[in-house]
Amino acid sequence: MFTPNVLRKFKSIVISSEKVGDLKSFRLVDGPGLLVVTEAVADYLRKWDFKALLLQPTQEYDGV
């Protein structure tokens, strides 16, 4: 349940394919600084060798 104006820290992220559908990227309501992308988008971004980009599997996300 979403409660506005409450800070939360994520310990892990589980993505429901039913809710996400065919979106290639999205932000979480409670974590707007975090951008979740598909593996295909992540693979494309890795080719560019950005210096300040962290790509991390959602199952390994630890709140950082």
Image (cartoon, rainbow, N blue to C red):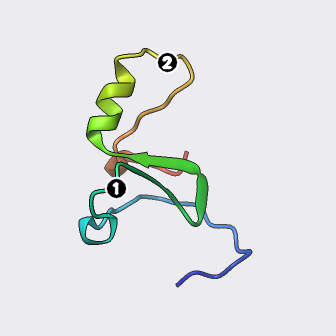
Label 2 CA crowd tier, 10 Å (few <14, some 14–19, many 20+): few
What amino acid is found at the position of numbered circle 1 in the picture? Leu
Residue 20 screen position, x and y as percent: 33, 64
Q: Closer to the camera, 30 or 37? A: 37
Task: Look at 57% across and 81% down and name the residue there.
Answer: 2
Is disc 1 placed on a helix, strand or loop?
Answer: loop
Q: Is residue 47 left or right of residue 36?
A: left
60 vs 43, nearest the viewer:
43
- The amino acid sitting under disc 2 is Phe
Please report the residue visible at 49 percent of the width from the left and 18 percent of the height from the top.
Answer: 50
Of pointers 2 and 1, the one earlier in the residue sequence:
1
How many dots with numbers? 2
Instruction: Tell me the residue that label 2 is attached to.
Output: 50
Q: Secondary structure at mark 2?
A: loop
Residue 4, compared with residue 26, is above or below; it is below
- Give coordinates of residue 35: x percent, y percent: 50, 47
Q: Is residue 11 left or right of residue 57?
A: right
Residue where numbered disc 1 is placed: 23
Please give left or right for residue 9 compared with residue 56 in the image. Answer: right
Task: Report which quarter residue 46 is drawn in.
Answer: top left
Tell me the crowding category of disc 1: few under 14, some 14 to 19, or many 20 or more residues within 10 angstroms, Cα based: few
- Quick one: which residue is furthest to the right in this view? 5
Q: Is residue 15 above or below residue 61?
A: below
Q: Residue at x 32, y 62 (%)?
A: 15
- Front position in the image: 13 or 41: 41
Q: Residue at x 40, y 59 (%)?
A: 13
The residues bearing labels 2 and 1 have C-alpha atoms spaced at a distance of 23 Å
Image coordinates for residue 58, horizontal then vertical, percent: 36, 49
Q: Between tags 2 and 1, which lies in front? A: 1
